[in-house]
Image (cartoon, grey):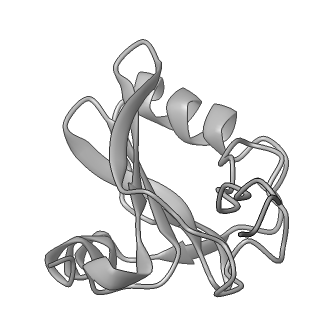
Amino acid sequence: MNTEAAKPPKVWNFNRNRNPHFFDNHYIMKTELKDIGSNMKELLVTPDSGIQGLCLLFSYETPVAGWDKEGAFKTEKKFSATTTKHINKYLELAADSARTVTQEWIIEQLAKIK
């Protein structure tokens, strides 16, 4: 009989202090939509949901920024001043290096989720 206690799986804690290795397959990522601020939600996507390691920021009900295996990204489309503040707050550690993508590209990523 094995007396060694079973170790729980590693679960990556997504937060704004991103680790560049959080896409490694040995982490178990849970899909969840969580409130991260007033009118701000973050969608965390598991690898078995169609895309490996995607996080999307929703400002109000619109996806506008996020993180993927290439790093941070934000929409090129201009929304309200509040949405711009949401994006800047969400990407505060990578705002200068975040790539700009079309709003259509962000919607396409969302559509790929199973």
Label tally = 0
Asked where in the image residue 73 lies, by quadrant, the reply is bottom right
Q: Residue furthest front?
A: 1
Residue drawn at point x = 82 percent, y = 60 percent: 4
Q: Where's the N terminus, which quadrant? A: bottom right
* Relative vertical location of residue 61 with respect to residue 68 in this rendering, above or below: above
Please tell me whether residue 91 is drawn above or below residue 72 in the rendered image. above
Q: Which quarter of the image is occupied by the C terminus?
A: bottom left
Q: Nearer the viewer, residue 105 or 112?
A: 112
x and y percent of residue 66 in the render?
Answer: 52, 60
Residue 37, percent from left and from top? 49, 17
Q: Is residue 73 left or right of 113 when viewed as pictured?
A: right
Q: Position of residue 19 (x, y in %)?
A: 85, 63
Q: Quadrant of residue 70?
A: bottom right
In depth, the one of 93 and 113 nearer the eye is 113
Above or below, 108 relative to 46:
below
The residue under the point 64% across, 56% down is: 11
Which residue reaches farthest top?
38
Which residue is found at the position 38% from the left and 50% from the top?
A: 78
User: Residue 79 versus residue 68: which sits nearer the camera?
Assistant: 68
Q: Compared with residue 76, is residue 70 higher up or lower down, i.e. above or below?
A: below
The x, y position of residue 22, in whole percent, is 73, 71
Residue located at (20% from left, 84% from top): 112
